[in-house]
Image: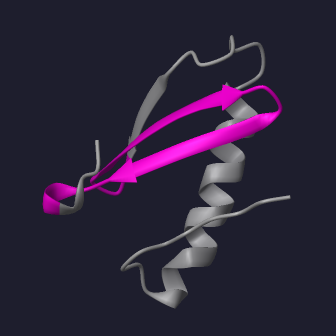
Amino acid sequence: MFYCSFNGVPAEERLHWRSFLVKLGADNLKGVKNEELLVASHKSVYIVYTVLGDVSVYVIGKDEYDDF
């Protein structure tokens, strides 16, 4: 299951982001300890991501819309 909420992201970019996040998690979340934070950047945005049990969580922020 993949749930995502894209506030202010145009519809044409959402597919790109979904694909990118799935690949990012597949490449980097194997062996990560519960709640260990990882940080990445892509297309001038920052991504903080982690695992909580069996759930992968991604938080993305950019400029004044940065919720970090």
Q: Is residue 60 magenta?
A: yes
* Percent of width and height locating residue 4: 62, 65
- Residue 49 in percent (x, y) is at 53, 35
Q: Which residues are magenta?
A: 42-64
Above or below residue 20? Residue 55 is above
Residue at x-position 68% and y-position 16%: 34
User: In the image, residue 47 lies at what x, y percent?
Assistant: 42, 42
Residue shown at the point (41%, 75%) measured from the top left: 7
Question: Residue sitting at 41 percent across and 78 percent down?
Answer: 9
User: Does 67 lie within the magenta span?
Assistant: no
Query: Magenta: predominant secondary structure element?
Result: strand
Q: How is the image coloured?
A: one colour
Name the residue nearer the viewer: 58 or 12: 58
- Of 5 and 12, which appears nearest the observer? 5
Relative to 44, does residue 27 appear above or below in the rendering? Answer: above
List the single residue furthest toward the bottom. 11
Taking the spot 25% from the left edge, 56% from the top edge, the residue there is 62
Horizontal arrangement in the rendering, residue 12 relative to residue 60 (left or right)? right
Q: Quadrant of residue 30?
A: top right
| Quarter occupied by the N terminus | bottom right
The answer to which of 43 and 58 lies nearer the viewer is: 58
Quadrant for residue 28, please give it: top right
> In the figure, is residue 8 to the left or right of 28?
left
Q: Quadrant of residue 51?
A: top right
Where 30 sits versus 25, above or below?
A: above
Position of the C terminus, as image quadrant, is top left
Total numbered labels placed on residues in the image: 0
